Image: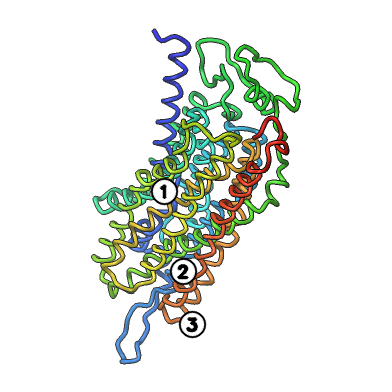
Amino acid sequence: MLGCKGEAVVRRWLTLVTGLLECLCFAGAVFGWASLVFVLKTEGYFSYLCVNTTRVNGTQFLDCSAQDEQFSLIFTIASFMNNFLLLPNGFLFDRFGTMVARLLGISMYTSGALFVAFSSSALSVLLFPALSCISVGGILFLVTNMQIGNLFGSARSTIITLYNGAFDSSSALFLIIKLLFEAGISLRASFLFLAACGIIHLVRTFLLLPRTHIPYPLPEGYTYGINCGQTKTFSPEQTAAIASVQSDDVMEEMPFNKESVEKVATFWECFLSKFFLWHLVWLSVMQLRHYLFIGTLNPMLQRLTQGEPSLVSTYTNAFAVTQLCGVLCAPWNGLIMDRHKGKPRATGVSEKEADLRASVLSLTLTALQCVLFSICASTPFLSLQYLTFIMQVLNRSFLYGGNAAFISIAFPPCHFGKLYGMIMALSAVVALLQYPCFTLVKGVLGGDPLYVNIALTLLSLLAFIHPVCVYLHCCGLAAQRGKPKDTLPSRSS
């Protein structure tokens, strides 16, 4: 039999692997929207909006632009809810812990799956609450799983980005549903199965996750779930104190003092900091570019293929398959951010400063990828879209993994849920611009998105300000250490 220590190690790895599977199979399904739209159009959802129209040359064709607008609106609302509701959900997670947040997420996800299962062409309107519920439930799966990185200190950023990559890859779930549909499995059967999987999420919530949070740094003797011995749990205040004390024996409540606990910034100090502001700009401009691309992928393929159904299906499948690679791409970003871990730091360099310095390369590469992806997406050549799909999944996996990892290293862990929710909520407000952009393309620009794509490419250049800001901050800290020694405090951090 395994001892208590061996059992704890097995439990940690089980938590890691099952969390990865949960994110990979369920969490980000809503971003595979293009695959589901293909099925929904086949099933006749919103087909009453298609009208026969006469071209200038006198020929008639079926104009389904109003149908496309409805599908685009559903995705716009779902993606907005995905991010905006992270604000109250982040506060909920920080205040009430993992179990409460997950029970909310499971109920939302299951409800959304049931809405789709019992929708039909006559009840197309059910797609609005359905996709929003699946979106909100899925992001709560991700948020409650990212803390698992705290169990593996030296690989923390790598694991956070791995989970975000799995979240991106889970958009392939709707591709699987599309392929099952083409093989004769109904949409209802697929979504009833997804709803039934809520039982698996519940079992994992009660057996493999803590009721509150996984602290960072991890206190010695920390346990969670079902244990062979007595469970040691800690409040956030106790965790902060224990982590900063060097003694291995002391596991009781400790007073705060200058030697044991560093002053923790308040939530509003973090929120109003230049790091948060420029990180918000960095995330928002790139997220808008991605959301508009995903939300308009089907009409874009319709235009580039002249409406050939088999070609649209082929490219839609290709896009969905590339999404599977998100889980492979995201850890590269984590490795970039963790590359200094385990190496001796220069005198006076704190762990936070080393983490921030390592993040500069990650932030810069992500911004560069977005510009290249936007240029490819702006080029109206059908065969080039394969490269666009590859650049999109690479950039998206770097974007969301890097976002979560940066917040976890730049700000105190006790504010992670609130700050992550706040930045996603504010970026969601910016992402609402995708619908006016779509309307502009369909109306004034006559279906040609070239000028909107050029504008978004130029807007993406703003993302480079953030890594420059972080780099200058690190240079400032290094310059302070370079001052005469008699001006330095005895314990530099």
Q: Which mark is residue 444?
A: 3
Identity, as a three-letter code, of the amino acid under mark 2: Thr
* Residue 213 image point, x, y percent: 59, 30
Q: Is residue 168 visible?
A: yes
* Residue 105 image point, x, y percent: 54, 40
Residue designated by label 1: 168
Seen from the viewer's position, the closer of residues 360 and 454 is 360
Q: Which mark is residue 426?
A: none
**Residue lying at 61% horizontally and 35% vertically, measured from the top left:** 348
* Residue 212 image point, x, y percent: 61, 29
Quarter of the image for residue 2 reads top left
* Mark-to-mark CA distance, 3 and 2: 20 Å
**Residue lying at 60% horizontally and 14% vertically, measured from the top left:** 248
Q: Which mark is residue 457?
A: 2
**Residue lying at 42% horizontally and 25% vertically, measured from the top left:** 13
Direction from residue 391 to residue 215 in the image, left or right: right
Image coloring type: rainbow
Pointer 1 with pointer 3, Cβ within 8 A: no
Which badge, 1 or 3, is on the more N-terminal residue?
1
Which badge, 2 or 1, is on the more N-terminal residue?
1
* Mark-to-mark CA distance, 2 and 1: 22 Å
Seen from the viewer's position, the closer of residues 315 and 376 is 376
* Mark-to-mark CA distance, 1 and 3: 33 Å
Q: Secondary structure at mark 1?
A: helix
* Quadrant of the drawing holding the C terminus: top right
